[in-house]
Image (cartoon, grey):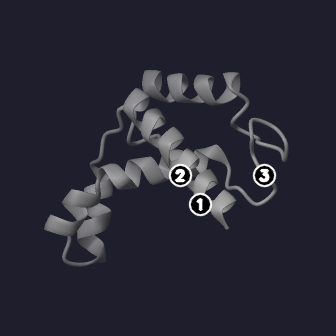
Amino acid sequence: MLRREMTVAQSMALWEVLWAEGLLREQPGHVGASATEPAFLLFVVAAVVRGQRRAVLDEARDVDDVLRLFANVRVEVWGTLQVARSLQRIYRTKQAEG
């Protein structure tokens, strides 16, 4: 649950935002989620991965390199939440387009 990538304070801030906005357990019809839409936390994880894409493409030669990169990644909570919201909007737009 990102415990190595964030400090305790950052983890608490992330979980507080997810809880306060009702994003931990999105239900169909709640906060714009559909029955097929992934939970918001998946978008948070995708935002973390997206933030490391350049390092993965430039430095990773095999699975061990990727694991090493992600073992040392640090997450900036507020920026990650912004990217996660953007990814969720993109997902919803593409789903609406068919």
- Rendered view: 41 above or below 15: below
Count the numbered circles shown.
3
Q: Is residue 55 visible?
A: yes
Q: Earlier in the sequence, mark 3 or mark 1?
A: 3
Badge nearest the viewer, 2 or 3: 2
Q: Which residue is mark 2?
A: 90
Q: Residue at x 45, y 34 (%)?
A: 82
From the viewer's perspective, is 21 left or right of 41? Answer: right
| Mark 1 neighbour density, 10 Å: few (under 14) some (14–19) many (20 or more) | few
Residue type at mark 2 is: Ile
Mark 2 or mark 3: name the one nearer the start of the chain: 3
- Residue 1 visible in the displayed image: no
Q: Give the amino acid at mark 1.
A: Lys
- Disc 2, disc 3: CB below 8 Å? no
**Can you tell which mark lies on residue 34?**
3
- The residue lying at 38 percent from left, 41 percent from top is 5
In the rendered structure, the answer to whether residue 95 lies left or right of residue 25 reads left
Rounded to the nearest whole Å, what is the CA distance between mark 2 and mark 3? 14 Å
Element type where label 3 sits in the image: loop
Residue to which mark 1 is pinned: 94
Q: Residues within 10 Å of mark 3 (few under 14, many from 20)?
A: some
Q: Which residue: 71% across, 56% down? A: 37
